[in-house]
Image (tube, rainbow, N blue to C red):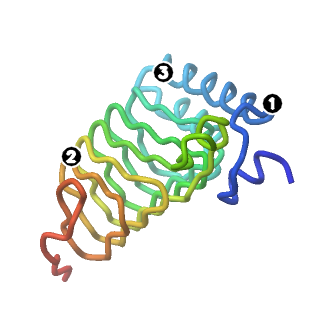
Amino acid sequence: MTEKEKMIKGLPYDPYDKELVTGRRNAHRLLREIAGIPEDKERQRKHFFKELFAETGSKFFIENPFICDYGFNIHWGENAYANFGCIILDAAPVYIGKNVMLAPSVKIFTATHPLEYKERNSGIEFAKSVRIGDNVWIGGGAIINPGVTIGENSVIGSGGVVVKDIPENVVAVGNPCKVLKSIENH
């Protein structure tokens, strides 16, 4: 099994593997291209995002600056939007649902490290997939941690740090993020 296959499956992997380094460099090259394209050239920008991501909807918008590790693990839903300063560390797959709104400075992390320092110091990492359901709104500065699922129609308050799954149809806030109330969707 290659280091890339291990990474995507959530197994320990070497992030300095040549194929993974090349993948990150390719993503960073595409991100530089995107950053240089004016926002009114939306069709051109979408072309590069479609090359960067595993999949996208036909209608979506991502503000600059946008940063990711690889891009090939990002599945971007129809009509999903990311405001300025979104960072997605996509060592494992990240699924962004339809009609998702990411406010400024939202961060989504999949990479993580061993807790035991000797193993951590070896440089080995592992990653856990993140899933964000349809119609989710994530407030500014929120952080979504590895392995988290956010249920459909939910809202994450600004500055929330999501460390556990959030159910559907709720407002969740705080650090750590906790359900504040249910949302009645009619």
Crowding at label 1, few (<14), some or many (≥20) Cα neighbours within 10 Å? few
Residue 163 visible at all: yes
Mark 3 against mark 1, which lies toward the viewer?
1
Identify the mark nearer the N-term, 3 or 1.
Answer: 1
Q: Secondary structure at mark 3?
A: helix
Identify the mark nearer the N-term, 1 or 2.
Answer: 1
The residue type indicated by label 1 comes to Lys
Percent position of residue 35, x then y: 48, 21
Q: Is residue 98 above or below residue 25?
A: below
- Residue at 78% over, 45% down: 3
Residue 111 visible at all: no
The residue type indicated by label 3 comes to Ala
Number of dots carrying numbers: 3
Report if the CB atoms under discs 1 and 2 are less than 8 Å apart: no
In the picture of the structure, the residue carrying the numbered disc 2 is 159
Q: Secondary structure at mark 2?
A: loop
In the picture of the structure, the residue carrying the numbered disc 3 is 35
Quadrant position of residue 149: bottom left
In the picture of the structure, the residue carrying the numbered disc 1 is 18
Q: Secondary structure at mark 1?
A: helix
- Find the residue positioned furthest to the top: 36
Quadrant position of residue 128: bottom right
Crowding at label 3, few (<14), some or many (≥20) Cα neighbours within 10 Å? some
Identify the mark nearer the N-term, 3 or 2.
Answer: 3
Mark 3 against mark 2, which lies toward the viewer?
2
- Residue at 72% over, 31% down: 16
